[in-house]
């Protein structure tokens, strides 16, 4: 049976930008909302917060910007802070003997202990989601509806293309992906060049049009999923 995620991916190909980035942005928001309102008291969630020392900068910024679920955020960050406080409480004394034995200062040792030992919970979930979408995209190349949706789309961003290509074992399917992506980026390059020409003081032709945001689309196309993209 075809999953709902597959149809969501087809719908995303009809939108601007990388379809996989769009789905992951949607899934990020859904994951964070669900976590804060449904799973904030779960033991494994708190263990993940301890190991990750909280959320990464990207997902922490998303949490802060929404202004929602603040009680859940507070509950989770009590746990994260408790972990780093315990680590500091157990700090070794920086004596010459310890330094000679370890070859490192106590500060260096403590810094290493403060490093997160796993990805932030949302990053962990999104890595898994990304893998599922990539598997759908590989299988989808054998389906006419997927191939048509992809070939009518703006392709995928460079980071996701790099992750997709090694998974495609069929030479014909690989060629179809590469040819479409080449076409998408060639058109984008032409828009950038037209924008540059029209931006010049000596331009006498039509005013800047759809190519006016080509610079922004170029950034997203090569960088991938931006925090607020």
Image (tube, rainbow, N blue to C red):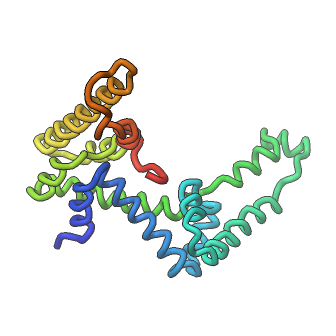
Percent x, y for residue 47?
Answer: 60, 71
Q: Farthest residue toward the top?
A: 202
* Pick the front one: 11 or 83: 11
Percent x, y for residue 66?
Answer: 55, 66
Would you say 31 lies left or right of 106 here?
left
* Residue depicted at 21% across the width and 46% down the height: 168
* Residue depicted at 29% across the width and 28% down the height: 194
Q: Farthest residue toward the left?
A: 144
* Residue depicted at 89% across the width and 43% down the height: 97
Q: Is residue 108 above or below residue 146?
A: above
- Using the rendered view, name the quadrant where residue 170 is placed: top left
* Residue depicted at 32% across the width and 54% down the height: 20
Q: Is residue 75 above or below residue 165?
A: below
Q: Is residue 90 above or below residue 223?
A: below
Would you say 211 lies left or right of 69 here?
left
Would you say 199 lies left or right of 153 here?
right
Quick one: quadrant of the N terminus? bottom left
Q: How many marks?
A: 0
Percent x, y for residue 41?
Answer: 59, 81
């Amino acid at each position: 049976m075809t999953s709902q995620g597959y149809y969501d991916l087809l719908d995303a190909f009809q939108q601007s930008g990388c379809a996989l980035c769009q789905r992951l942005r949607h899934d990020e928001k859904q994951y964070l909302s669900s976590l804060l309102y449904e799973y904030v008291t779960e033991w494994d969630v708190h263990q993940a917060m301890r190991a990750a020392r909280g959320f990464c900068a990207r997902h922490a910024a998303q949490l802060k910007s929404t202004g929602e679920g603040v009680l859940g955020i507070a509950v989770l960050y009590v746990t994260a802070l408790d972990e780093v406080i315990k680590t500091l409480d157990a700090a070794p004394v920086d004596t010459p003997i310890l330094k000679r034995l370890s070859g490192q200062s106590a500060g260096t040792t403590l810094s290493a202990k403060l490093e997160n030992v796993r990805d932030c919970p949302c990053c962990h979930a999104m890595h898994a989601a990304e893998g599922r979408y990539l598997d759908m995209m590989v299988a989808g190349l054998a389906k006419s509806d997927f191939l048509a949706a992809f070939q009518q789309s703006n392709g995928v961003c460079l980071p996701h293309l790099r992750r997709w290509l090694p998974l495609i074992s069929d030479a014909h399917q690989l060629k179809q992906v590469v040819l479409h992506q080449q076409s998408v980026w060639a058109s984008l390059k032409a828009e950038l060049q037209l924008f540059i020409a029209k931006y010049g003081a000596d331009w006498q032709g039509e005013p800047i049009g759809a190519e006016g945001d080509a610079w922004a689309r170029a950034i997203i196309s090569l960088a991938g999923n931006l925090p607020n993209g």
